[in-house]
Image: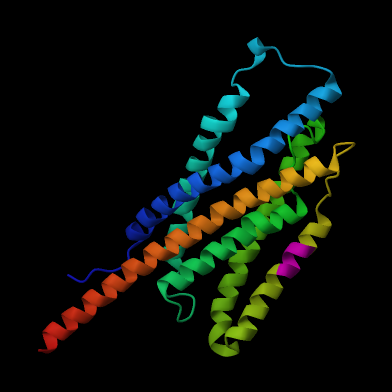
Amino acid sequence: MTRRLTPRTFLVHGLVAGLLAGFAAFLVAHQIGEPQVDAAIAVEESAAHHHADEHDVVVSRANQSTWGLATGTLAIGTTLGGLVALVSAAAVGRLGRMRPSQSTALVALVGFVATALVPFWKYPANPPAVGDAATIGDRTSAYFTFLAISVLAAVAATVLASRLLPTLGSYRTVLAGAGGYLLVVVVAGLLLPTVDETGGFPAQTLWLFRRAALATQATLWAAIGVVLVGLVGRTHRRIAEESARRELAVSL
């Protein structure tokens, strides 16, 4: 029986890639993100002239910044890796003449742009001390609305590009797909409310926090993409070599 790349194979590879990516994201978040969270908390406590009592703290900052952070990034990484793998499995053979590893790389790239990079452009991450508690519901709704629009626009642009490819060729197809996606998200970004509640928060601390947040997301997606593409490519080559040996054996 000839082996082939199945959704199960993709999923296993994706879970492995996601687990490794979660660990990589933890290292980045711990080293460059957590110091900025501590700085933001210090600003918040200084402004409020209040320091929390140890008895009021359910989870200490030490645990939050280590075991809690690691648990979160590993769980998110594994879940995201599995989702990217399943989408990549569905994309095989539907994106022109791309090999499975190439279409997987494209899925990871589009996923990062649509779910991390573009939403960050409209609604960048804020540290704990930034934002009015009374508007958190509205801010959350606006963010997820824009995220949903970005993802749906990316899916629609990819499907449209796959259909236009035989007619327009690679270059014009990429321009059409990317242009359509950008048009949708720019219009949505202009129509959705702008959040500007930084107040007197130190600009340098805010910038460093946002930079660390984006770096963590970029690390997560890059690690998933690199590891998953490598695993899928290796498996595809092995299957192709097996198939070639079988065909040679039959022809003798």
The quarter of the rendered structure image containing the N terminus is: bottom left
Residue at the (55%, 83%) spot, across then down: 165
Way the structure is coloured: rainbow
Q: Which image quadrant for residue 29?
A: top right
Q: Is residue 112 above or below residue 45?
A: below
Find the residue positioned furthest to the right.
200
Q: Is residue 69 above or below residue 153?
A: above
Is residue 151 visible in the rendered image? The answer is: no
Decide if residue 13 is on the left or right side of residue 238: right
Give the x, y percent position of residue 246. Answer: 17, 79
Give the x, y percent position of residue 41. Answer: 74, 29
Q: Which residues are magenta?
A: 182-186
Q: How many marks?
A: 0
- Residue in front for this viewpoint, 185 or 14: 14
The quarter of the rendered structure image containing the C terminus is: bottom left
- Residue in front for this viewpoint, 228 or 166: 228
Residue at the (47%, 72%) spot, across then down: 102
Give the x, y percent position of residue 37. Answer: 70, 35
Q: Is residue 197 magenta?
A: no
Q: Is residue 230 above or below residue 237?
A: above
Q: Is residue 184 magenta?
A: yes
Q: Which image quadrant for residue 127?
A: top right
Is residue 155 visible in the rendered image? The answer is: yes
Main secondary-structure element of the magenta-colored stretch: helix
Q: Is residue 123 above or below residue 62?
A: below
